[in-house]
Image (cartoon, helix red, strand yellow):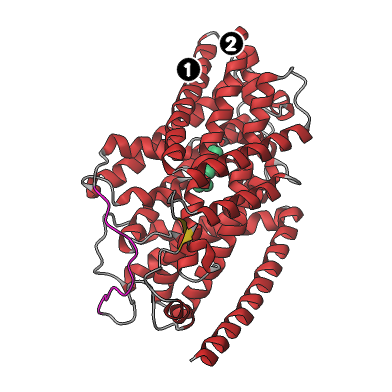
Amino acid sequence: ELTSPNAHADLTSIKERRTNSTSRPIEDVNSGKNEVLFNEKKTLKRHLGLFSGISFILGMIIGSGIFVSPKGVLIQTQSVGLCLVIWVLCGVVSMLGALCYAEIGTVIPLSGSELVYMREGIGSVHLRTGDILAFVFNWANTFILEPSSVAILSLTFSTYFLSGIMDSCGPPIELVKMLAIFVVGVLGTVNGISVTAANRLNIAFVVCKTVTILVITIGGLVRIGQGYTQTLKSGFDGTANNPLSISLAFYSGLWAYSGWASLNSVTEELKNPKRNLWLSIVVALSSVIILYLLANISYFTVMNKAELLSSDAVAVTWGEAVLGPVVRLLPILISFSALGSANATIYTSGRYFMVGARYGYLPEIFSCIQKQRLTPLPSIILITILTIIYCIPSNIGNLIDFFSFVAWVFFGLTFVATICCKFTKPKAFRVIKVPIPIIIFMILVAIYLVIAPVISSPNVGYLIAVIILLVEKINMFFQEFFDLTIAVVNIEA
Ligand code: ARG
């Protein structure tokens, strides 16, 4: 049985809220009175200290990327030196991005992240533009970002899991996809049935991640001590020199750091946020940068460039060389690390879709909660089905490019929104104030990351054409749908 969180409001008022642009669900930016019209967010208890903040971020960021992206970065950079530089740069960009998000997250402290930043941030300069961008973001997020992330993560899970239990010849791709689809179904069911079970699962997976990454980094340091440094010594030999194609290396690296944008969900639960928020971002991301750098160095102590490029599961190849008899354990741990992120992403998607539906950007059914189990069941079913569709035709590398392109369009727009708010909401409480030049730098980074791949890689170009067409079609459909709803409401009235 489903219940709508707006059950207290009758259907007409929901329709009015959707169609009447003056009745805005949250703080009315134009009234200047900061009047709260419809604030669905309860205040949460501040119970997380600095340490919890840092572990939360680590748990959210570390997943599949460090085990699958090294190949993608090396393909585009062609040299060990540039490869390592890109890994560090991706970390720095993610850290600056997270700081910008921390700022806008406290100016607009509502759930829905980019959706509300478009609506309230860009909308505070131009209402209609903000609204349209919020709408487009919501659709891109629902149909591209969330399901493609879960697909990448579950495909990584099955690649590594099957490599762990099968012979070294590598599992057939059909089997990889079938297992990925099966686990997506299982995770969807768990998330649809019980919030507690989904959360417990998460904690277990965070332990797997930590153990795995420590094994690889420490193993690497030992190998260096033993003198396996030939590949590392090759430095910048053979470096690719096309700045456009290097942008695709960033896509692979940034995937491994992705997750920083979901940090805002903890802001209001942090104790002493003025100090702990920026500090946990800086400490956590610096730790991730160091861990990722060491992990990559560790891979290069085992494989040369050609070997790394020909391996489908680099960490398995690494394990075979370094761990000997316990090699089977490593891929299994890695697969659970990816599975943990898949589980967390399904969990948060359910909440995202719910917020989108409350704003009227998705059909109302997705704002419903299952009455007995209190889970956003319709949203969970949607993300599960969409993810399965993504698992069928795709390979992990293409999915990562697909995800990163769309994600950076909206990261860029969120940075623009952060600047807008500096002018339109100068007096709002800010837990951190990022200097404008840094935000402008991040906007330029986003522009580079969105434009360069389109020019350098025709694949990404086609993709964008498809997305633009789709968005146009969906928009047209929605316009007609809205007109119809307004007509129906008028007739009823
Ligand atoms: N960085 C993670 C990884 O390497 C992916 C996190 C996906 N979650 C997300 N919200 N984008 O697998």
Is 167 above or below relative to 416? above
Answer with mark 1 or mark 2, whichever residue precedes in sequence: 1
Could you tell me if the residues under marks 1 and 2 are in contact, i.e. CB atoms within 8 Å? no
Residue picked out by circle 2? 326
- Left or right position of 279 against 59: left
Separation of marks 1 and 2 at Cα, in angstroms: 15 Å
Secondary structure found at label 2: helix
Of tags 1 and 2, the one toward the viewer is 2
- The magenta stretch is 33-45
Q: In which quadrant of the rendered view does residue 110 lie?
A: bottom left
- Is residue 113 visible to us here? yes
Ligand 1 under 8 Å from disc 2 Cβ: no
Ligand 1 under 8 Å from disc 1 Cβ: no
Q: Please provide percent x and percent y for residue 150.
A: 59, 44
Q: Please provide percent x and percent y for residue 30.
A: 34, 81
Residue at the (40%, 36%) spot, across then down? 286
Is 67 above or below relative to 135? above
Q: Which mark is residue 46?
A: none
Q: Nearer the viewer, residue 337 or 249?
A: 337
Label 2 CA crowd tier, 10 Å (few <14, some 14–19, many 20+): few
Is 455 above or below relative to 59? below
Q: Nearer the viewer, residue 264 or 95?
A: 264
Residue at the (69%, 33%) spot, across then down? 238
Type of residue at label 1? Ile
Residue at the (56%, 43%) spot, across then down? 189
Residue picked out by circle 1? 218
Magenta stretch, main secondary structure, is loop
Q: Please provide percent x and percent y for residue 57.
A: 40, 40
Secondary structure found at label 1: helix
Residue 36 lies in the magenta stretch: yes
